[in-house]
């Protein structure tokens, strides 16, 4: 009796933990509430496979219970041997045929969806973005637009956006669960996929391929805005003045330090294709600092002073002279004034 009680308690605890953990997802980092075409396709297939699995479970449990009750040993049957059904062709056909049918029911929509999502027939008339995964950040080059950005990928809602995905160093994987499925970013070839967001918003992206010590911190965002806002953003980004005059003395000093410390060797402001480090255009409107910290001047100072602690293995560590707190503060002040567009993540409804 007590053994059963112990098992029941363990089961109840497991159920409780499952319920609690099921609420741990983030609204814009979930495949279970799709807001884009690819994610919707994946969700439909997930629902279909869960229905099949639940149906199989229920039927197997029913047959199991019936067998357990109906064919249990009765009094006087101690030496009774039931009818042997080994080699029964009907049974063998049934239990081979049913799994094949179930696999086909799952495979057909999956294969159709895979081909649909790989279809690039209208790529030439759509927005194309070259996506490059780097340890541990993402670069976006809007093809034919002379716009380079990093970390935040602005897209118009309701339109297909084609992505040419590659990597500069090791294999990464581009994944925005609420909008689309995953696509590997390889150093040796370009993989193409398209994404389409249905609703305005900021959607969290993750690197989905182990790529080094800061793999789990290789976050980025898709900022989906209305087509009108997107056009305005494109105009703003095309007209960026890389030498934009800072608004106060501290930021002016920051701009001088930025140049004196040769930050431009790796970073760019404007449409320069330099992409050794993240492009810093429109930095004031970034959703995060280094992909993971809240966008405050204090966090940027912390990042500039000790990037290694925040993102181990990043390529910024050791690539510039160590800064005093005052110098880091000036540079942070300068970067946080790089506001090149009125279209911001907040205007995307977040
Ligand atoms: Cu990665």
Image (tube, grey):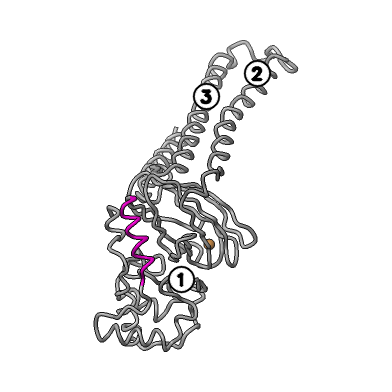
Element under disc 3: helix
- Mark found first going from the N terminus, 1 or 2: 2
Q: Percent from the top left, x then y, of residue 255?
A: 35, 84
At 53% from the left edge and 68% from the top edge, which residue is drawn? 135
Q: Which residues are magenta?
A: 227-240
- Label 2 crowd bin: few (<14), some (14–19), many (20+), radius 10 Å: few
Q: Nearer the viewer, residue 19 or 200?
A: 200
At 63% from the left edge and 58% from the top edge, which residue is drawn? 189
Label 1 to label 2: alpha-carbon separation: 59 Å
Element under disc 1: loop
The image quadrant that residue 301 belongs to is: bottom left
Number of numbered labels in the structure image: 3
Q: Decide: is 220 above or below 256.
A: above
Label 3 to label 2: alpha-carbon separation: 17 Å
Would you name the residue on which mark 1 appears?
278
Find the residue positioned furthest to the left.
248
Q: Percent from the top left, x then y, of residue 26?
A: 36, 51
At 45% from the left edge and 80% from the top edge, which residue is drawn? 264
From the image, which quarter does the N terminus lie in?
Answer: top left
Type of secondary structure dominating the magenta stretch = helix
Q: Is residue 88 left or right of residue 240?
A: right
Foreground tag (1 vs 3): 1
Would you name the residue on which mark 2 appears?
94
The image quadrant that residue 119 belongs to is: top right
Marker disc for residue 61: 3
Q: Percent from the top left, x then y, of residue 150?
A: 44, 66
Foreground tag (3 vs 2): 2
Find the residue positioned furthest to the right.
87
């Amino acid at each position: 009796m007590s053994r059963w009680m112990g098992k029941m308690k363990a089961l109840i605890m497991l159920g409780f933990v499952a319920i609690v953990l099921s609420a741990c997802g983030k609204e814009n980092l979930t495949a279970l509430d799709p807001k884009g075409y690819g994610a919707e396709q994946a969700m439909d297939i997930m629902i279909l496979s869960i229905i099949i699995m639940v149906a199989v479970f229920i039927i197997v449990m029913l047959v199991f219970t019936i067998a357990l009750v109906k064919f249990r040993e009765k009094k006087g049957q101690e030496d009774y041997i039931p009818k042997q059904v080994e080699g029964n062709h009907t049974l063998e056909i049934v239990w081979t045929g049913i799994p094949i049918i179930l696999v086909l029911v799952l495979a057909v929509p999956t294969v159709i969806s895979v081909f649909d999502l790989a279809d690039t027939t209208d790529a030439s008339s759509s927005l194309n973005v070259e996506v490059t995964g780097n340890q541990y950040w993402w670069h976006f080059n809007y093809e034919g637009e002379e716009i380079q950005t990093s970390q935040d990928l602005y897209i118009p809602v309701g339109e297909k956006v084609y992505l040419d995905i590659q990597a500069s160093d090791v294999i990464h994987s581009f994944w925005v669960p609420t909008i689309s499925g995953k696509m590997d970013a390889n150093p040796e070839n370009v993989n193409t996929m398209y994404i389409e967001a249905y609703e305005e918003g900021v959607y969290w992206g993750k690197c989905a391929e182990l790529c080094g010590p800061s793999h789990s911190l290789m976050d980025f965002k898709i900022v989906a805005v209305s087509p009108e806002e997107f056009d305005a953003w494109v105009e703003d980004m095309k007209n960026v003045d890389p030498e934009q005059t800072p608004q106060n003395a501290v930021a002016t000093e920051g701009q001088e330090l930025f140049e004196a410390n040769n930050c431009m060797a790796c970073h760019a402001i404007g449409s320069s294709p330099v992409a050794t480090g993240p492009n810093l255009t429109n930095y004031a409107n970034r959703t995060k600092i280094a992909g993971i910290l809240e966008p405050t001047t204090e966090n940027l100072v912390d990042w500039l002073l000790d990037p290694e602690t925040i993102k181990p293995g990043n390529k910024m560590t050791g690539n510039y002279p160590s800064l005093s707190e005052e110098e880091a503060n000036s540079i942070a002040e300068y970067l946080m004034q790089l506001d090149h567009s009125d279209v911001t993540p907040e205007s995307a409804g977040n």
